């Protein structure tokens, strides 16, 4: 593994960002310089060369005005014709100054034009005007000399116009050249950006994405159950460290699994011992207990009333204790079998199941004058014997812990997402909210056994059966009177598919 791959990812990213920033700075600086040159070329063309061309035309017009004014004054001897001559001189001076500000002396042509104009005025225009004024009309200076000088002026102005036209062409060429440079810079920046993005993508893929993908593949292999697979991570330092951490976690999981296998073996042995105990309890212990109960009952029938009152009381205690011991052992066996002895789960019509349970309580219902109302109940997947025990225990408690009036029991169910929520409510003596958790603990009783018979296993059995089926059971504590138990059972997969469809 080479050195750059061992560098921290933060440092690699810092180097990449620094390179990108440097490239961006160079590109931006070059573009700014090119745009500045483009702006200067445009400014020279638009703000200097073009106005200079117009100033040449104005200068030519000023000279022509002077020549026209002198000619008109010679022909008419009227001073009004000297106005263009005088205005033309002023315009000539201003235009020449403006030309110098815009484009300079243009190869000395502006100065030569000024010299020729002064020479034309001194050698021809001013003597001619003075002669006309002196003679009163008709007199003129050396016309031929004036024509030669003015032709030289025209030629110089034409040359000035040609020079400025050359400046304009050169400015347009410069402008086009700078525009091309800017265009190539923009294209170059675009190409550079594409290359930088592609290079950065490849670099990030090799330095970050590929090592992370490799680490993820190793991790998935371990997660699939191959805990002996060694994770070999490469790439930046953070990725290597993450691989080492995952490897350490894998080794810890292997150690925990080995410990778990040991505990599982111990648990299997313990379960086997418990099953053996259950067998003994159901056979070896039951037989002597039945003998004790039978002989105590025989003793009660044969000698009942023949002994004193205390002896009869002792016999009654012995018979009652034997019966309760038998009930307790049977209940414990039933409790231990929940979830341990599993049977195939089938679809159970709870309407039919609860009807059968209610039918089994027909004698007690008639004895107590109870009313049991059963709403529409769904079909669920589970073990019928166990679910029957849940409703049997809840209905038995409702009949047992009744109040002064006849028991009224209501059983219902409603759909709540992916579970069915069942409720069994009665108008009995109720349970205080602070006992809502205690009542589901095995052997926990809220009343003396003389007041209400039972072993204290019923509700613990209900919770174990409901949780075995994937649900929960609880006491509803916000009822006005009586008792209401609620529990949930999962909606069968067949019903979920129907709803989805």
Image (cartoon, helix red, strand yellow):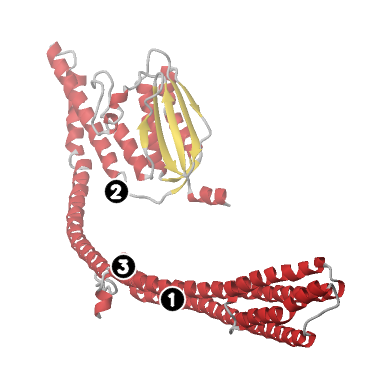
Q: Residue at x 31, y 44 (%)?
A: 338
Q: Quadrant of residue 48?
A: bottom right
* Image-based side of 146 in relation to 31, left or right: right
Q: Which residue is mark 2?
A: 340
Task: Please name whichever residue, 498 or 399, is drawn nearer the observer in this view of the structure.
Answer: 498
Nearer to us of marks 2 and 3 is: 3
Q: Pointer 1: residues within 10 angstroms few (<14), some, or many (20+)?
A: some
Residue 92 placed where, x, y %? 68, 72
Number of numbered callouts drawn: 3
Distance, label 1 to label 3, CA atoms, is: 32 Å
Residue 103 placed where, x, y %? 59, 76
Q: Quadrant of residue 91?
A: bottom right
Q: In this view of the protein, can residue 42 be seen by the observer? A: no
Q: Eyeballing the image, is 123 above or below 346?
A: below
* Image-based side of 380 in relation to 261, left or right: right
Q: Which residue is mark 1?
A: 196
Q: Which residue is mark 3?
A: 219
Q: Earlier in the sequence, mark 2 or mark 3?
A: 3
Q: Earlier in the sequence, mark 1 or mark 3?
A: 1
Local secondary structure at mark 3: helix
Nearer to us of marks 1 and 2 is: 1
Residue 31 placed where, x, y %? 49, 74
* Image-based side of 185 in relation to 133, left or right: left
Q: Eyeballing the image, is 144 above or below 30?
A: below
């Amino acid at each position: 593994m080479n050195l750059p791959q061992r560098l921290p990812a933060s440092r690699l990213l810092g180097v990449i960002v620094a390179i990108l920033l440097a490239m961006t700075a160079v590109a931006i600086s070059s573009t700014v310089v090119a745009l500045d040159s483009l702006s200067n070329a445009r400014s020279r063309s638009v703000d200097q060369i073009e106005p200079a061309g117009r100033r040449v035309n104005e200068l030519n017009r000023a000279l022509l005005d002077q020549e026209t004014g002198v000619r008109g004054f010679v022909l008419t001897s009227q001073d009004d014709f000297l106005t263009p001559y005088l205005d033309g001189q002023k315009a000539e001076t201003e235009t020449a100054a403006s030309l110098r500000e815009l484009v300079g002396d243009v190869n000395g042509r502006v100065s030569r034009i000024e010299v020729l104009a002064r020479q034309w005025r001194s050698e021809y225009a001013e003597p001619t005007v003075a002669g006309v004024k002196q003679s009163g009309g008709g007199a003129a200076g050396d016309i031929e000399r004036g024509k030669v000088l003015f032709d030289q002026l025209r030629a110089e102005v034409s040359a000035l116009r040609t020079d400025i036209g050359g400046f304009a062409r050169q400015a347009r060429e410069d402008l086009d050249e700078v525009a091309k440079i800017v265009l190539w810079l923009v294209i170059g920046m675009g190409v550079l950006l594409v290359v930088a993005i592609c290079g950065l993508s490849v670099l990030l893929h090799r330095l970050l994405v590929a090592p992370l993908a490799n680490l993820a593949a190793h991790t998935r292999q371990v997660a699939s159950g191959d805990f002996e697979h060694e994770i070999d991570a490469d790439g930046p330092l953070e990725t290597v460290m993450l691989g080492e951490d995952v490897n350490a976690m894998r080794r810890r999981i292997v150690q925990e699994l080995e410990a778990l296998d040991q505990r599982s073996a111990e648990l299997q042995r313990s379960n086997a011992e418990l099953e053996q105990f259950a067998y003994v309890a159901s056979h070896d212990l039951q037989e002597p207990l039945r003998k004790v109960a039978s002989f105590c009952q025989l003793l009660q029938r044969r000698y009942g009333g023949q002994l004193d009152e205390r002896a009869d009381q002792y016999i009654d205690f012995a018979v009652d204790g034997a019966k309760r011991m038998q009930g307790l052992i049977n209940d414990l066996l039933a409790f231990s079998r929940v979830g341990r002895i599993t049977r195939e789960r089938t679809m159970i019509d709870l309407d039919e199941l609860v009807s059968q349970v209610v039918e089994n309580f027909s004698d007690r219902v008639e004895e107590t004058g109870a009313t049991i109302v059963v709403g529409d109940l769904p079909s669920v997947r589970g073990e019928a014997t166990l679910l029957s025990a849940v409703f049997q225990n809840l209905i038995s408690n409702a009949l047992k812990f009744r109040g002064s009036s006849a028991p009224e029991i209501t059983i219902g169910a409603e759909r709540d997402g992916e579970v069915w929520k069942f409720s069994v409510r009665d108008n009995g003596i109720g349970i205080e909210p602070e006992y809502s958790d205690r009542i589901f603990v095995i052997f926990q009783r809220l009343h003396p056994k003389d007041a209400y018979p039972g072993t204290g296993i019923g509700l613990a059995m209900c919770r174990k059966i409901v949780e075995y089926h994937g649900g929960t059971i609880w006491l509803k504590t916000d009822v006005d009177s009586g008792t209401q138990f609620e529990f949930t059972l999962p909606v069968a997969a067949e019903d979920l598919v129907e709803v989805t469809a």
